[in-house]
Amino acid sequence: MNPSVHDCSGREYAPLYMGRYAVEGQVYLVSFSTAGKRSLFCDYLTASTVCRCIVDPRLWYRSRLLGWMLMPTSWHGLIRVAHFDDLAILVQRIKTHTTRGLRRERPGLGRIWETGFEDRQLKTEHELLRTARSVMAQPVRAGIVAQAGDYPYWNAEWL
């Protein structure tokens, strides 16, 4: 593991990740927010650009994205970490790739993502499915849509 990890802006956040590592083959719930918790993804063009970037196979050549949800102010993903992948570096790649895609489509948005991310290891299949259901229900709980299937910015391999 790198003793010093940088986010997509180049800032160090090593102290938070000292001693932390992702276990190969395990699934993690990963979440990160937009800079300043701005509601960037209420706009169709902005949200659809990020969605295209998120599923780009160039990001997922080792680890696997099992499911994800793009909310107006955040992104949540279920990631199975592969051998030789580092979760912090994978998140950095996701943020960098989505930022570049957005800047091509919408130059002038300013900073896209907040520094850092949250993660939680999901140790059992039951915990994974329960967490997946919870992530997919977020737009309903937030009052954005009445039914989860009505929200367009998500995907899961179980469907």
Image (cartoon, helix red, strand yellow):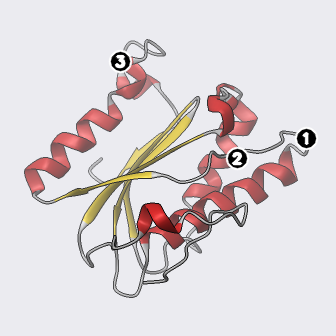
Q: Position of residue 104 (x, y in %)?
A: 86, 54
Q: Earlier in the sequence, mark 1 or mark 3?
A: 1
User: Where is 116 relative to 35, above or below?
Assistant: below
Q: Is residue 100 left or right of residue 96?
A: right
Is label 2 or label 1 in front?
Answer: 1
Tag 1: residue type? Answer: Gly
Circle 1 residue:
108
Q: CA distance from mark 1 to mark 3?
A: 31 Å
Residue 37 lies, in percent from the top left, at 62, 30
- Which of the pair 128/91 is nearer the observer? 91
- Residue found farthest to the front: 15
Residue underneath mark 2: 49
Say which residue appears at 40% left-offset and 87% top-offset: 84
Amino acid type, callout 3? Arg
Q: Which mark is residue 141?
A: 3
Residue at 65% x, 46% y: name it: 113
Q: Secondary structure at mark 3?
A: helix
Mark 1 and 3 residues: CB-CB less than 8 Å, in contact? no
Which comes sooner in the sequence, label 2 or label 1? 2
